[in-house]
Image (spheres, rainbow, N blue to C red):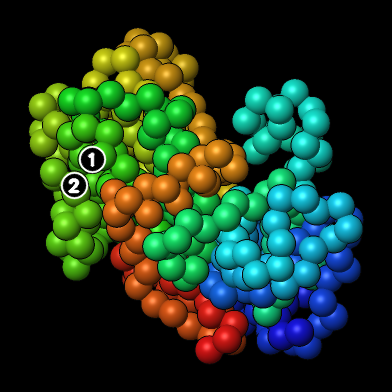
Amino acid sequence: MKAMVVRDTGEAGVLALEDVPEPELRAHDVRIKVDACGVCFHDVVTRNGTMKRGIELPFIPGHEVSGEVVEIGPRVTQFQVGDRVAAAQRRHICGHCGLCRTGQETSCEEREFLGDAGLNGGYAEYVNVEEDNLALIPDGVALEDAAIAACAIGTELNAIRDIGKVRPGERVLITGAGGGLGIHGVQLARLAGAFVVAVTSSEEKAARIREAGAHEVVVTGRGEDFSARVRDVSDGGVDVCIDNVGSPTFQPTRRSFAMGGRWVFVGQLTGEFVQLNPAQLFFRNLSILSAKSTSREQLRDSLDLMRRGMVQVRIVERLPLDGAVEAHRSVEAGRSVGRTVLRPAL
């Protein structure tokens, strides 16, 4: 099969189109003919070497996968050939630990994040995913759109609804609002009844972010302190921040909170550490939380929101597999408002 392979970490050019064997089909595996695979910043930090935990070279990147089932392992019971499916970002979980049995499989000790290790990721014509990490795509949801349901939509749903517990009328800050996660986070926060303040680094993105549902958009240069403007437009500070950026915006984000704010980390775009005096948290009664990936139930909920037209998928570019280099450069430069997907059949 054709696949984009990373054999050594580095700049985007290390991604190379190769012919590789199809991955071995295990007992609980579902083989998927990939229709689309989203390009996430997670793919960038694994490819460039920033992220090291769980990474094994060589690897095929890509965890935002949708496609059609073409083969199933002998112990698969939930899917059959011809089903349209979307992956929940993982290739394997144990399925029986306390975390897996209580909807917290994103923290399973055995979890294998799809595309982080070995030649079995979504930047390929075929990928194998165990059945516990898949969901059926409802009628009315396009295969291409379903590719990004778990990550770009499901992770934000996890952060806003389940971790951040956003309530109607609360003021919510979305950082990195023009990115693939942020643009969907804006929609979900608005859907939750929040007053949505979005931060972006590009004036060109502001109109699209407003169209997605932001009440206020703060345009700021990279490295600038945007907190005064956020506090101004939110009447004193925000109650919740869905932080899709991490270290680069840490200090201005911290200064943007009202008393008792809830800070939910979703993304970390660099390997940088931050300085923090704990008093800066407890004097303002701030809580730091995190939303790690998407459970299968959250994936199903995301697909249902898409089916009902309550969340609009923002796919901005469709490229063939060998367009992965171009896609990575675009994501790193922050040029896109939404997700780029790779389409192996193009």
Q: Nearer the viewer, residue 57 or 84?
A: 84
**Disc 1 designates what residue?**
190
Q: Nearer the viewer, residue 85 or 87?
A: 85
| Residue type at numbered disc 1 | Arg
* Residue 27 position within the rendered picture, expressed as x and y whole percent measured from the top left: 89, 56
Q: Could you tell me which residue is drawn at 72 percent across and 72 percent down?
A: 70
What is the distance, in whole Å, between disc 1 and disc 2 at their CAs? 7 Å
Depicted 186 relative to depicted 106: above or below: below
Q: Nearer the viewer, residue 116 or 297?
A: 297
Depicted 125 relative to depicted 65: above or below: below
Q: Could you tell me which residue is drawn at 75 percent across and 61 percent down?
A: 30
* Residue 19 position within the rendered picture, expressed as x and y whole percent measured from the top left: 78, 88
* 218 displayed left or right of 49: left
Residue 220 in view, yes or no: no
Q: Could you tell me which residue is drawn at 32 percent across and 27 percent down?
A: 166
* Residue 42 position within the rendered picture, expressed as x and y whole percent measured from the top left: 57, 57
SS for callout 2: loop
SS for callout 1: helix
| Discs 1, 2 touching: Cβ within 8 Å | yes
| Residue type at numbered disc 2 | Ala
Residue 13 in view, yes or no: yes
Q: What numbered label is drawn on residue 214?
A: 2
* 180 displayed left or right of 38: left
